[in-house]
Image (cartoon, rainbow, N blue to C red):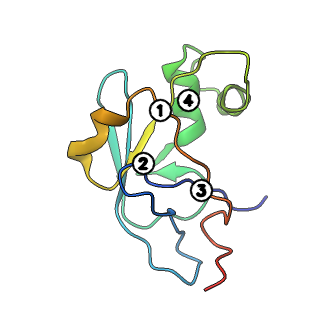
């Protein structure tokens, strides 16, 4: 399994992982349904922010329980309206991104050319 990542929605920066040539930075993953959040200071590249799996949260906020596979299916289902977690550097800006899907990082948070 390879790495995967997104861009922080408030800054547009690729969320680099600890194994890349770029330093990590603090990212907050926010549940837009109840404002619960998880703080991640050292992203490892596998979708876990502050101990919470991104795809499990996708499943949970869309009524599918904590089934990670369901969350992955929802992430790529273009025929269903899906709520997504918010990924931001500045927690105070999270609410303005509710209802917006985070952009996936083409470089997977690792494969940067610089």
Which residue is pictured at 63% across the width and 72% down the height? 110
Work out which quarter of the rendered image holds the N terminus and state it: bottom right
Quarter residue 32 falls in: top left
Residue 111 in the image: x percent, y percent?
68, 74
Residue 15 in the image: x percent, y percent?
50, 62
Residues at marks 1 and 3, CA–CA distance in whole angstroms: 16 Å
Residue 72 in the image: x percent, y percent?
70, 34
User: In this image, 34 relative to 12: left or right?
Assistant: left
The residue pinned by badge 4 equals: 58
The residue pinned by badge 3 equals: 5
Q: Decide which of tag 4 and tag 1 comes sooner along the chain.
A: 4
Residues at marks 4 and 3, CA–CA distance in whole angstroms: 15 Å
Characterize the local packing of mark 2: few (<14), some (14-19) or many (20 or more) Cα atoms within 10 angstroms.
many
Characterize the local packing of mark 3: few (<14), some (14-19) or many (20 or more) Cα atoms within 10 angstroms.
many
Residue 48 in the image: x percent, y percent?
52, 51
Residues at marks 2 and 1, CA–CA distance in whole angstroms: 9 Å
Quarter residue 96 falls in: top left
Q: Which mark is residue 111?
A: none
Answer above or below: position of 7 versus 37: below
- Helix, strand or loop at disc 3? loop
The mark closer to the camera, 4 or 1, is 1
Proximity of marks 1 and 3: CB atoms separated by less than 8 Å: no
The mark closer to the camera, 1 or 3, is 1
The residue pinned by badge 1 equals: 100
Answer above or below: position of 83 versus 4: above
Proximity of marks 2 and 1: CB atoms separated by less than 8 Å: yes
Residues at marks 2 and 3, CA–CA distance in whole angstroms: 12 Å
Q: Nearer the viewer, residue 22 or 70?
A: 22
- Helix, strand or loop at disc 4? helix
Which residue is pictured at 51% across the width and 63% down the height? 14
């Amino acid at each position: 399994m390879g790495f995967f990542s997104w861009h922080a929605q408030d800054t547009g920066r690729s969320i680099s992982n600890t194994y890349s040539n770029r330093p990590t930075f603090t990212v907050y993953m926010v549940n837009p349904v109840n404002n619960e959040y998880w703080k991640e200071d050292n992203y490892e590249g596998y979708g876990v922010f502050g101990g919470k799996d991104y795809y499990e949260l996708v499943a949970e906020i869309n009524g599918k329980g904590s089934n990670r596979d369901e969350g992955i299916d929802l992430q790529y289902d273009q025929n269903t309206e899906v709520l997504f977690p918010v990924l931001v550097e500045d927690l105070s800006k999270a609410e303005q991104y509710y209802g917006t899907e985070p952009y996936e990082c083409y470089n997977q948070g690792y494969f940067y050319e610089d």
